[in-house]
Amino acid sequence: MSTFRLRWWPTPPAVLAYGVAILSVTAALALALLLEAWVQSAPTVSLFLCAIMFVAWYGGLGPSVLAVVLATVYFTLFMVEPTGAVAVDGHDVPRIVLFILTTVFVILLSAAQQRNAQELVRVNKALLAEVAQRRRVEAYLDEAQALSRTGSFGWTPASNDLFFSKECQRLLELDLDQRPSFDDILARVHADDRPMVHAVRERSDAGQPDHDYEIRWRALAGTTKILHVRAHRVRLQSGEEELVVAVMDVTAARRAQEALHATEVALTHAARVATLGEMSASIAHEVNQPLAAIVTNGAAGARWLDRQPPDLGEVRSAIERMIRDAQRASEVVQRLRALARKAPVERQPIDLNEVVGDSIAFLQREIQTRRIVLKSELRPGLPPVVADRIELQQVVINLMVNGMQAMERVSDRPRLLLVRTSSETGSEAGQAVLAVQDSGIGLDSASLTRLFNPFFTTRPAGLGLGLSICRSIVESHGGRIWASTNEGPGATFQVALPLSTERIA
Amino acid sequence: MSRVFVVDDEVAVREALDSLFRSVDLKVDLFASAAEFLQYMRPDGPSCLVLDIRLPGVSGLDFQDELLRAGIRIPIIFMTGHGDIPMSVRAMKAGAIDFLAKPFRDQDMLDAVAAALKRDQQMREAESANRALREAYERLTTREREVMALVTSGLMNKQVAGELGLSEITIKIHRSHAMQKMKARSLADLVRMSESLGLQAAKSRRP
Ligand SMILES: Nc1ncnc2c1ncn2[C@@H]1O[C@H](COP(=O)(O)OP(=O)(O)OP(=O)(O)O)[C@@H](O)[C@H]1O
Ligand SMILES: [Mg+2]
């Protein structure tokens, strides 16, 4: 840190200062006497004044007063007749008084100047301290921005002035020597996100003060960063409008989120495939039946053709049956494919009853082989729910399969599986409710609280994922899932989903 | 006229088999369940049953047992799906004619049906022959039955006479009457008949 210096030496110790005062005035006298001897004329007063000024400047007030006294003594002794005595002629008094006044004036001047100089030093010090403080604050700010991966910049739309914080430069990888303009910045935004930025700017121009959005940013390495941008419009005292913008690098968070989501999707898919695997025998059977029929119809048709005369009516009906059965086989395969597919979630208004119907069709074989008595009570005209059809079907199938599994060892009563849909009034108003009720082993209070936990299972072959996946699906649809025990034997699982305000397209 | 009964819960399979069997001039009756088949009064004549091994409610195998217990002897051809091999073994032991995995070749099915019908016919013939024999045997007198049993057990006429305390002549008369009534052409014929009637056991009871 540099200090503003008034003098190139520090304040001298008092003894030295007074010594210098005596020395300077005596030197001035000596010089005056020498000059008097050599050239018969000496600027005595000027020399004394010089000496006093020097002392005042060098030593301050005390030494300069001493210098004045000494100079006055010397003056009266050597410069005023009679020399060598302190006696003064009357007509010389004004000269001496004038001399004294002059010297006092010089001292006062010098003292004032000294004070000013000292004031200057003080102010300067304060200023330096403030600058240092600001630097520290700035450093903290930079550090904080770096730590939080938040950069900021200010933008004055009127003058198109941009100011970037250090972290912002680092984040955006800007070369400030190029003095980037708004358009330069925009050029680095992912092309798909540019219209959004334009839209934000339009809204801002229209007077909306706050903005919050995410953009993809092209990093220099060719990768893409995800930036969370928050902007606030402020009116400066000058009347100018400025946009204060905070930019956060949320790439890592988003990537983690995406990875998590991908894992969830994969898990949901895996569970679905596992369900399919568990039912592979009944599914194979369901595809095999129409295939067997098709093969037999084909053979029969050929035989009717070979007869003399050929019976074309029989041939035609055999072909018609083949078409019908092939269609059925393909429907089964399609249902399977839909459940096994790994497609992105797609939400639209759908009919819950239809999903239940599909699920029942899918489980038909399973229901038969397990000797289940299935009853469905589907509320007609149920308003649609907004959901992903496959995910919802997975929920229904999981609940039905669980119910059937809970009745596996039931032999003293009918294995009753009741699937019901309703649209609630009252506390559940605006919701569609699906209930799957069984007459199985039921739920004890200990498992009731853990049912929906991942990996909670009481089945030897179970993964314990079915219900936890159901819950995450239902909750991601803004719905609720819960279990209760029946009055009689068995359990009931219910799902409430918000009704769509739209009609089914 | 030969008849095929088809029991399968799958209407598509029933209809296809119906067409196939009719195309070779077989009479067909279709049933969606075992219960339906049991309620049906089967007309007489050679017939066989084409049965899906997996039926809702009662399985094909249980149904086979049920038929056996009810004394309904009808050749069964099982249709199986995937992975039904253990079931097939059990059914085979219980006397099933054949197994056809769905989808099957039409010729295999028709061959199996033909074999089953033939066996049913043989069984029916054997049964009716047996019935005729039994009726003839019932027309024999007690004495004639005694003589027949001893003669067919391998004793000479003289030994039989000694056994029954009668003259050899009398034995010869009884024996020729028995052979006439039984329509046996030779002694060997009579021996086979007594075997069919299970008379061998009667002899062994004698010390
Ligand atoms: N309808 C029901 N009646 C009684 N218990 C049930 C019922 N549904 C679920 N449970 C209990 O909740 C547990 C967890 O069910 P969940 O569907 O999550 O897993 P799982 O069926 O065991 O295995 P999987 O992951 O294959 O579905 C079951 O093991 C069972 O103990
Ligand atoms: Mg489950």
Image: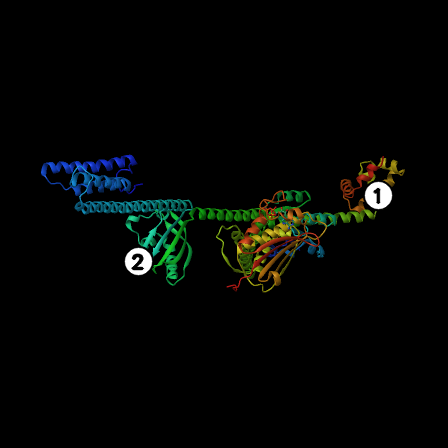
Is B178 positioned to the left or the right of A373 in the image?
Answer: right
Q: Can you see residue A429?
A: yes
Location of residue A110 by image quarter: top left
Q: At numbered mark 2, what does the secondary structure look like: helix, strand or loop? A: loop
Q: Which residue is mark 2?
A: A159
Q: Residues within 10 Å of mark 2 (few under 14, many from 20)?
A: few
Depth check: B118 or B174 in front?
B118
Position of A152 with respect to A368 (left or right) is left
Q: Is residue A204 above or below residue B180?
A: below
Residue at the spot of label 1: B145
Badge 1 amino acid: Arg
User: Up-down: is A298 above or below A426?
Assistant: above
Say above or below: B55 vs B169. below
**Quadrant in the rendering for residue A182:** bottom left
Marked residue chain, label 2: A
A448 or A280: nearer the viewer: A448
Place of residue A497 in the rendered image (x, y in percent of width and height, measured from the top left): 57, 58
Measured as percent of width and height from the top left, residue A238 is found at 33, 59
Q: Quadrant of the C terminus of chain B?
A: top right
